């Protein structure tokens, strides 16, 4: 296993409740009142729809408001990773990731472990540059028991709700999260900050038409069937923990680009701050070298004029 590379669950596609649109020459995130399921292929107009998207859309009258899913792991923290994150807008690389107590920060001398006072108390995180950031991996369909779809969010309502639901379902099921028939559901609410306009967030429930008691019975049956077939859930979760702990940051530069585009819109002050927060050492060296060359050239021209 390559050291320094976080090994994440294989991703087949993305789940979102918004999209990136172009307005006045700028690419800006736009919230939506429905789910969109996309592939990992991007075209001129954005991410291409996954075949699941069309199927769910037809079944639900044009707008996807719920998605039947299962989870990969019994451990809530393996299914859903939530933390404070700050990205460098120019490179798409994560600069600092923390949990409110400690953080991993990219510095000129390498990645360092430092105290994390949360965005409100961190000088690096001013102007909204650092945001809560969550990633949920889920299974859709039965074709690939290890291939997941990822839902990314910086929404506090989604992060808080998903964290609570995962903890509660793990508790009531006797640590059988991976066997429960569940459903992602879109919900709306109005707040004082939204000025009465609905905002949408993601919830996790048992599937429509299935009671909690039926879901628990199904989970026990599926667990017994998998164990009988030799499916080792404990070993799977051990492998996942090792993969997540193999590096400092979950996102690489390719994934970071899409995160930056969606969560740090062009013209947002947070983006500018994130961009200036921690340039890569090689970029600083290049900038310094260029300044020196320009100064030398100016001095030579002045000397020639004299």
Image: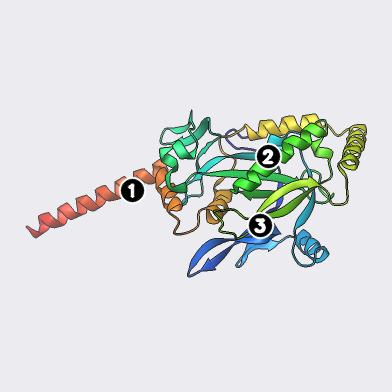
The mark found on residue 17 in the picture is 3
Q: Could you tell me how far apart the alpha carbons at marks 2 and 3 are, in whole angstroms? A: 18 Å
The mark found on residue 163 in the picture is 2
**SS type, badge 3:** strand
93 sits to left or right of 14: left
Residue behind mark 1: 287
Q: Residues within 10 Å of mark 2 (few under 14, many from 20)?
A: many
Q: Nearer the viewer, mark 2 or mark 1?
A: 2
In the displayed structure, would residue 154 be above or below residue 121? below
Q: Could you tell me how far apart the alpha carbons at marks 3 and 1 are, in whole angstroms? A: 39 Å
N-term-proximal mark, 2 vs 1: 2
In the rendered image, residue 253, in percent from the top left (x then y), is placed at 54, 48
Residue nearer the viewer, 95 or 161? 161
Q: Tell me where residue 9 sits by quadrant.
A: top right
Q: Tell me where residue 199 sits by quadrant.
A: bottom right
On-image quarter of the N terminus: top right
For the point 56% across and 56% down, which residue is it? 194
For the point 11% across and 54% down, which residue is it? 303
For the point 30% across and 46% down, which residue is it? 289
In the displayed structure, would residue 22 be above or below residue 81? below
């Amino acid at each position: 296993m390559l050291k320094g590379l976080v090994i994440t669950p294989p991703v087949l596609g993305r789940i979102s409740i918004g999209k990136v649109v172009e307005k006045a020459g700028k690419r800006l995130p736009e919230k939506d009142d429905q789910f969109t399921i996309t592939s990992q292929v991007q075209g001129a107009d954005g991410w291409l729809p996954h075949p699941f998207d069309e199927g769910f859309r037809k079944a639900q009258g044009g707008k996807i408001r719920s998605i039947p899913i299962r989870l990969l792991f019994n451990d809530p923290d393996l299914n859903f990773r939530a933390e404070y994150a700050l990205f460098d807008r120019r490179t798409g690389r994560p600069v600092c990731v923390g949990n409110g107590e400690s953080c991993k920060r990219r510095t000129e001398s390498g990645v360092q472990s430092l105290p994390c006072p949360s965005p409100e108390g961190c000088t690096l995180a001013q102007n909204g540059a650092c945001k809560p950031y969550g990633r949920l991996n889920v299974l859709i369909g039965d074709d690939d028991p290890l291939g997941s779809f990822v839902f990314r969010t910086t929404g506090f309502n989604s992060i808080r709700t998903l964290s609570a639901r995962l903890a509660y379902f793990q508790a009531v099921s006797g640590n059988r999260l991976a066997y429960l028939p569940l459903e992602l559901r879109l919900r709306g609410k109005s707040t004082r900050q939204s000025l009465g306009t609905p905002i949408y967030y993601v919830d996790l429930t048992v599937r429509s038409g299935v009671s909690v008691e039926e879901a628990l019975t199904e989970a026990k049956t599926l667990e017994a069937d998998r164990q009988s077939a030799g499916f080792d859930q404990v070993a799977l979760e051990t492998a996942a923990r090792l993969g997540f702990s193999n590096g400092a940051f979950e996102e690489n530069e390719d994934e970071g680009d899409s995160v930056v585009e969606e969560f740090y819109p062009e013209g947002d002050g947070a983006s500018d701050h994130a961009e200036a927060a921690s340039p890569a050492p090689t970029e600083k060296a290049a900038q310094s070298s260029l300044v020196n060359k320009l100064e030398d050239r100016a001095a030579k021209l002045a000397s020639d004029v004299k």
